[in-house]
Image: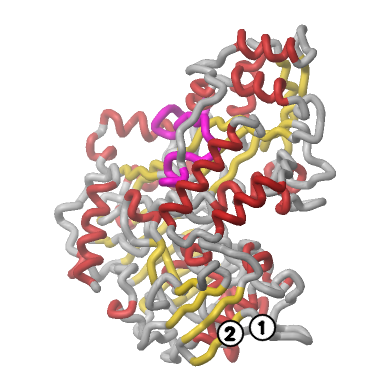
């Protein structure tokens, strides 16, 4: 998915769960209250959540785009699988949620079978069935409920033409339910990452009798540990306990607070100030969408009590320069290599607020992706760029006197554009800056008819795997004419597509990630983009919040594990 803008930058059995969550505190940078936390006795209190998001489109699981279950949605919705509720690298692992395991694949990973746990219930006491999960997935195909990830339409047999359960052909035959506790997915191609997709909210069960179409987003039926007491879109959401939820069927959510009070539409500055002050109810507060800014980091450096309330982690994302290789001068690999040598990554990291908030990258996949990260640096620019090498390559490409190109960028990222402009000037490259309003940036850049020759873009993994990181960016079959195209290089190589298909047949996750890493290293030699940096997520919490860690799927606090005094 397109990388989120850094929201607050300067200029992703109970005994076993107790062990993993307690370890989580030590695994993050937070040192607050780790020793005092007792997962077996963490119940009580009201957790305050301060967010910039407005949630003005509501909480329909079909419309949400929330990798690994999201922050708030994970409290309301359970899915077939979910992410492991653990800090650090183990948190990249997919584990069972409603299902008894992460799925039984056929030999070529084109059929996936799931069996549900016993005793699963909604907040109204109804039993959760496999038919509810099938219906929940089918709803996500309706044009009325657009917004979720696009993979199901591409992966499921018949998915490309299916229009959802409200029309003349309500059934999607590639999803079968042999009985109330079994569901089978028939794919049109091998997909070894299917267990990761099954963690998306589109796999949350929806009882057909309770479906109110577009209005479902205001009061969806909960299958998670909390249910909606009050929801005012754009303003607030109050969650209270689902009394039918049981820890005996859910090893991945502690659900400590009795109530969760979420405030929407706050500014990043207000959130940062309230969390830092930690006065009154704000002592019991966290945020699920706002990083601290550089000023707060500076204060924390000299205030140990504030530093103890910082938690860091990484969502796998990459900010990069995207070349449209169908347009001059970037149809010439020598020009692309020149841009790769001339980049000043130190200036970009500083523009993002320093090394605590960003890490320079020479690879497309970041280290936080796990085993799919294979370090390489084919065009060594050093810390501040290799202008001499860039000039040499430009001369070979027919530009001995340098060249002038336009750089399109989101007007929320002016500091990055300015840093790039200054760096490339040293190599005789003049960047004419073309700011595009944030509200229309993606639609302009990802439309093949309006895509500029050079743009500043970012990509984040929908789950921690090389598949959703590399496939949308480099698979020629994913080039979408018109809007919604993320293969900005418009790179199309049948041999690479064959490699992608072969990797997708691998159901051993470790082996698959090694293969994705090999592919990234192979593609890196083509200079189809210039990797710049990956964001480091540093988040603040109130002084009375315990058991905080930043999960490795989204880069925010895991709200399902925290507690308050």
Query: In which quarter of the view is residue 299 placed?
Result: top left
Does the magenta portion include 362?
Answer: yes
Query: In which quarter of the view is residue 131 placed?
Result: bottom right
Residue 354 drawn above or below residue 154 = above
On the rendered structure, is 409 left or right of 111?
A: right
Residue 469 drawn above or below residue 318 = below
Main structural element of the magenta stretch: helix, strand or loop?
loop
Residue 508 rendering spot, x and y as whole percentages: 43, 59
Does the magenta portion include 231?
Answer: no
| Along the viewing direction, whichever of 16 and 365 lies nearer the viewer | 365
Tag 2 and tag 1, C-beta contact below 8 Å: yes
Which quadrant of the rendered structure holds the C terminus? Answer: bottom left
* Element on which disc 1 rests: loop
Residue 93 rendering spot, x and y as whole percentages: 39, 58
Reading the image, the residue beneath label 2 is 176
Residue 403 rendering spot, x and y as whole percentages: 77, 15
Q: Residue at x 64, y 30 (%)?
A: 527
Query: In which quarter of the view is residue 132 placed?
Result: bottom right
Reading the image, the residue beneath label 1 is 173
Q: Residue at x 65, y 62 (%)?
A: 150
Question: Can I make out residue 349 in this image?
Answer: yes
Residue 421 drawn above or below residue 503 = above
* Element on which disc 2 rests: strand
Question: Can I make out residue 57 in this image?
Answer: no
């Amino acid at each position: 998915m397109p990388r989120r803008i850094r929201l607050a930058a300067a200029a992703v059995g109970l005994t076993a769960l107790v062990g993993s969550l307690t370890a989580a505190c030590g695994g993050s940078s937070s040192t607050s209250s780790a020793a005092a936390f007792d997962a077996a006795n963490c119940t009580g209190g009201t957790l305050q959540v301060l967010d910039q998001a407005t949630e003005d489109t509501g909480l329909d699981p079909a419309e949400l785009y929330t990798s690994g279950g999201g922050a708030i949605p994970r409290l309301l919705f359970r899915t077939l699988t979910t992410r492991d509720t653990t800090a650090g690298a183990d948190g990249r692992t997919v584990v069972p949620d409603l299902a008894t395991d992460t799925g039984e694949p056929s030999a070529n990973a084109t059929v996936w079978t799931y069996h549900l746990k016993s005793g699963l219930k909604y907040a109204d006491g109804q039993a959760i069935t496999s038919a509810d999960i099938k219906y929940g997935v089918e709803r996500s195909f309706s044009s009325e409920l657009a917004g979720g990830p696009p993979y199901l339409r591409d992966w499921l047999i018949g998915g490309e033409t299916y229009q959802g359960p409200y029309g003349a052909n309500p059934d999607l035959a590639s999803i079968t339910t042999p009985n109330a506790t079994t569901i089978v997915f028939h794919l049109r191609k091998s997909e070894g990452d299917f267990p990761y997709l099954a963690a998306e909210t589109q796999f949350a069960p929806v009882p057909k009798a309770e479906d109110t179409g577009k209005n479902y987003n205001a009061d969806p039926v909960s299958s998670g540990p909390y249910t909606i007491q009050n929801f005012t879109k754009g303003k607030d959401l109050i969650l209270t306990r689902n009394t039918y939820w049981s820890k005996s069927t859910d090893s991945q959510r502690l659900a400590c607070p009795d109530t969760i009070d979420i405030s929407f539409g706050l500014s990043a500055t207000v959130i940062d100030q309230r969390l830092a002050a930690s006065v009154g109810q704000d002592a019991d507060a966290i945020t699920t969408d706002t990083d601290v800014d550089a000023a707060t980091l500076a204060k924390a450096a000299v205030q140990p009590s504030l530093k103890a309330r910082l938690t860091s982690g990484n969502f796998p994302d990459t900010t990069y320069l995207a070349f449209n290789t169908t347009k001059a001068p970037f149809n010439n690999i020598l020009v692309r290599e020149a841009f790769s040598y001339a980049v000043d990554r130190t200036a970009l990291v500083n523009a993002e607020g320093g090394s605590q908030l960003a890490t320079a990258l020479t690879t497309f996949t970041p280290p936080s992706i796990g085993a799919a990260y294979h370090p390489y640096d084919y065009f060594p620019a050093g810390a501040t760029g290799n202008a001499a090498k860039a000039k040499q390559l430009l001369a070979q490409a027919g530009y001995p006197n340098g060249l002038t190109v336009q750089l399109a960028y989101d007007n929320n990222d002016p500091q990055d554009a300015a840093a790039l402009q200054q760096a490339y000037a040293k190599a005789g490259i003049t960047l004419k800056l073309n700011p595009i309003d944030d509200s229309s940036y993606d639609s302009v850049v990802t439309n093949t008819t309006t895509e500029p020759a050079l743009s500043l873009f970012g990509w984040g993994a929908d789950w921690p795997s090389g598949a959703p990181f590399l496939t949308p960016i480099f698979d020629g079959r994913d080039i979408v004419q018109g809007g919604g195209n993320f293969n900005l290089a418009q790179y199309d190589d049948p041999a690479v597509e064959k490699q992608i298909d072969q990797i997708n047949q691998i159901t051993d996750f470790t082996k698959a990630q090694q293969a994705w890493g090999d592919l990234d290293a192979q593609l890196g030699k083509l200079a189809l983009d210039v990797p710049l940096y990956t964001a480091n997520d540093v988040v603040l919490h109130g002084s009375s919040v315990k058991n905080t860690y930043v999960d490795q799927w989204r880069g925010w606090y895991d709200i399902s594990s925290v507690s308050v005094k």
